[in-house]
Amino acid sequence: MPTACMRRSEEPCRRLSSHANRSAPALALASPRRSAKPFAKDKFSATEMLQRPLLPLLPSKTIADVVITTLSANTTTMFPSEAASGRTTDSKIKGLRVFNNWIKSCLIQRYSPDEDHAPGSREMGRTSGKELLILDMGCGKGGDLNKWQQAPQAVQLYVGLDPADVSIEQARGRYRNMGNPRGGRGGGRGGHHRGPPARMFDARFHVKDCFGETIEDLEIIQQVGFDPSPMNRRGFDVVSMMFSMHYAFESEKNARNMLRNVAGALKKGGRFIGCIPNSDVLGEHVRKFNTKAAERREAKKKEEEEGKAKAEDAPEPEDGELEEGEAEPSAEWGNSIYRVRFPGATPEDGVFRPAFGWKYNFFLDEAVEEVPEYVVPWEAFRALAEDYNLELQYHRTFPEIWEAEKDDPELGPLSERMRVREPNGGPLLVSDDEMEAASFYIGFCFYKV
Ligand SMILES: C[S@@+](CC[C@H](N)C(=O)[O-])C[C@H]1O[C@@H](n2cnc3c(N)ncnc32)[C@H](O)[C@@H]1O
């Protein structure tokens, strides 16, 4: 069984909270009590959110450092989404894996062709017919190679970048196997098309930190063309960042580096697709947690004022009660397969400002490694992306994508072949707890203007 710290997706807060309230977490977390620093309650504009200094709780290690050290030291380590989209068959999160993979297929199917996205255009096959150039930033072990092989518009070149050398080696191996009829997953298995396998695209893989540094120095990036300005006529058709972009939100510098790399690599009119955790879901949980904590504080204060808790008479605090001066435990929630915990203080109103450095830990069943993640406050990200000539085209939660695409004549049957649901429009094969974990995510598409 693989070890993993895994990724998932998202859904409306309504559903999350009802699940979170009733489910008993199976993943024990060490030390639920952490010291909490006071949080400034001031309100900030979008510009101020981006400009405010970073929180002091930023770690000195960057996520890329963690990735490189962890993955180099342990070849079985998996990120949440890798575990949640991997190939293990005997797994408690099998439904989550196939669901996340299906969602990624939907994004690739819908937003990779260089068509206009007016209703009916896909059915009418309005594409240039040109082969696509794809850049996968944070490609991991190449889990999306087969999805690109099944893309509606043929791919000419796929470039996969990731700072983890072990993952890049595995991605290379997976690509080699795709050309092998006995070892590969190509040729339509689980894929979009049922016809004969498409010609294999050319693929290149490089060990690269795409957030801490520029990717401009890579020869293949220069060959395709790198220019962040709106004048760029060369470049990739699609930049994909599946379950990886949020690691860049460790700092404003990294988020800007990441967006400069995306914008620089994209041609004018090219698309930036991906999936990230939903800051609305994170914010709602945090807000509820802090409201309850404030109510507890208020009740305690009232009790003290009424003279019921005189220090000399007070009994020893029982387990779970806060002692005088003790910090509130940090925000955390989850269910039988996943758990989220913020190690530090969180905003009382659930609005994450400034926009960077909001670290939390995500645990998924079958995961042993803990890789910190960072909240991507959606509106701040959207505003920042505009600075890099990236305009929002699409933004949906995973459950919304499911509802919108499950009856699509191509994506619906694909969900059945991938075992997301039973054949002939039958029931979902994703449990409630898996769906709650999947509901942690959103899919997006920007295009470069
Ligand atoms: C959860 S995995 C997702 C892998 C793959 N995109 C998928 O969907 O299966 C997150 C990936 O982000 C990568 N990552 C972390 N920091 C990065 C950075 N600075 N630059 C590029 N990729 C990074 C990790 O190495 C890891 O492979």
Image (cartoon, helix red, strand yellow):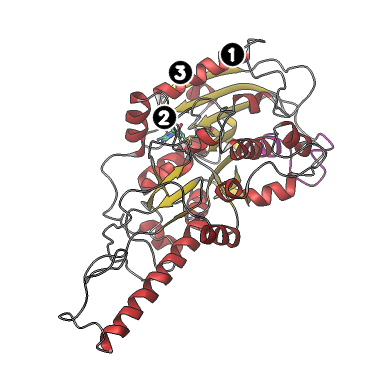
Q: Secondary structure at mark 3?
A: helix
Above/below status of 118 relative to 321: above
Residue 169 got which mark? 3
Task: Give the residue number, with chain letter if any, for mark 2.
Answer: 77
Residue at 24% across / 82% down in the picture?
309
- In the rendered image, residue 402, in percent from the top left (x then y), is placed at 69, 47
- The span picked out in magenta is 109-125
As drawn, the residue found furthest toward the left would be: 312
The residue at label 2 has a CB less than 8 Å from ligand 1: no
Mark 1 residue CB less than 8 A from any atom of ligand 1: no
The kind of residue tagged 2 is Thr
Front residue of 284/313: it is 313
Q: Residue furthest bottom?
A: 306
Task: Depth check: give the residue in front, 224 or 425.
Answer: 425
Whether residue 394 is visible: no
Callout 3 crowding tier (Cα within 10 Å): few <14, some 14–19, many ≥20: some
Residue at image coords 73%, 49%: 404
Of the numbered discs 1 and 3, the one sitting upstream in the chain is: 3
Whichever of labels 2 and 3 marks the residue nearer the N terminus, that label is 2
Q: Which residue is mark 1?
A: 177
Residue at position x 36%, y 74% in the image: 296
Q: Is residue 207 above or below residue 180?
A: below
User: Whole-Å distance between the Cαs marked 2 and 1?
Assistant: 21 Å
Q: Quadrant of the C terminus?
A: top right
Q: Amino acid at mark 3?
A: Glu
Amino acid on which the number 1 mark rests in the picture: Asn
